[in-house]
Image (cartoon, rainbow, N blue to C red):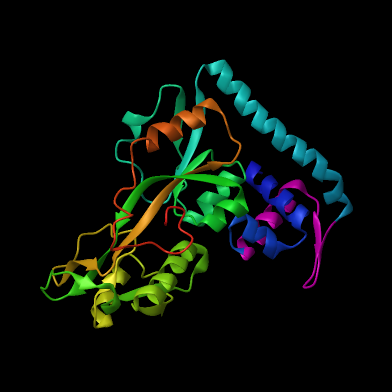
Amino acid sequence: MELRHLRYFVAVAEELNFGRAARRLLIAGPSLSQQIKALERDLGVRLFDRDRRSVALTPAGAALLPDIRDLLDRADDLRSRAARLSGSEPLRLGYVNWLPPDLAARTPASAQVHVDAWVAPSHLQAARVADGSLDLAVCWVRTADLDRLGLDARLVGVERLYAVATGRDTGAVQARDTVVLIDDDAAAWSSWNVYAEELARATGARPVRISDGGVTGAAFFDHVRRAGRPVVNSPKGQAAPLPPDLVRRPLIAPEICWTWSLVRRRGDARAAVLAVADALTDGVGDLGIHAPDVWLPDGDPYKR
């Protein structure tokens, strides 16, 4: 039994709807259902009566809800007290695939920053900050996500996307002459799909739906070979070097940017959290995202 399972239980108990709770937590509905079933197995009781039309707390679930809320509050208090006793506060930092390259050098001595080993998509990392599983995370978020989850965000990094193409031409390519991949696995690619769909609408890039996880990896290279035009590379990037038959081409008209935010819970005024946020974001500036020919999706927290 993990604290995050208890936080999931509280969310479902408050919403009495798995779909709404999953959206609030920014996780897939089937995954949330499985997590609740796992918690019920661990506790040895059924927490919810559910059918296709309704969800209701069982008597056991209703009886345990106040205790679980109290346990979560006490767990948060325990972490704070332990931090005060140690003289420096441990913080958990989650990420997707990018972190500031000078993270260790910029981290203040007043905080012990532990980079979380669970690398997860942006929407999951944002949800983990909201439910207290993480203190901070570097991820892609929209203003609507911040409002729904009660998070604050600061710009910490920017990636300028490029295209991958067959042939030898390494010259710039206009965004409207590219393909952008959209994966059917929404649980893994939710943030990218939202971004990619808007990119296609805004620039005229051709959206292509896939179901093989080929937004990245070796399958991505196969999609490039079949596409007949350059394919936009996602910010998750490619772990392997480009094969010799493929080339990297800059994107122009517009230049396509993906923003990385450092997110924390609104109202979290712990000195260590604020110190880390300041250390990682002070002096970052706008990283060129407000230049005339730069595209950001609607809802990006930094779009003017």
Q: Quadrant of the C terminus?
A: bottom left
User: Going by the image, does 150 lie left or right of 257?
Assistant: right
Query: Which residue shows up at 59% across the image and 63% down it?
Result: 28
Q: Is residue 69 visible?
A: yes
Badge count: 0
Q: Nearer the viewer, residue 53 or 219?
A: 53
Residue 130 part of the magenta-drawn span: no
Q: Quadrant of the N terminus?
A: top right
Q: Is residue 119 above or below residue 185?
A: above
Q: Position of residue 29 (x, y in %)?
A: 63, 64
Q: Nearer the viewer, residue 262 or 291?
A: 291
Q: Which residues are magenta?
A: 29-57
Taking the view exactly as shown, the residue that stands out farthest to the right is 59
User: Going by the image, does 28 lie left or right of 253?
Assistant: right
Q: Quadrant of residue 23?
A: bottom right
Q: Quadrant of residue 163?
A: bottom left
Q: Position of residue 129 (x, y in %)?
A: 56, 44
Q: Is residue 2 visible?
A: no
Taking the view exactly as shown, the residue that stands out farthest to the left is 168
Q: Position of residue 134 (x, y in %)?
A: 54, 41
Q: Position of residue 170 (x, y in %)?
A: 13, 69
Residue 46 part of the magenta-drawn span: yes
Q: Nearer the viewer, residue 18 or 60?
A: 18
Query: Which residue shows up at 77% across the image and 53% down it?
Result: 13
Q: Is residue 137 above or below residue 73?
A: below
Q: Quadrant of residue 291?
A: bottom left
User: Going by the image, does 290 lie left or right of 13?
Assistant: left
Query: Which residue shows up at 67% across the image and 32% down it?
Result: 75
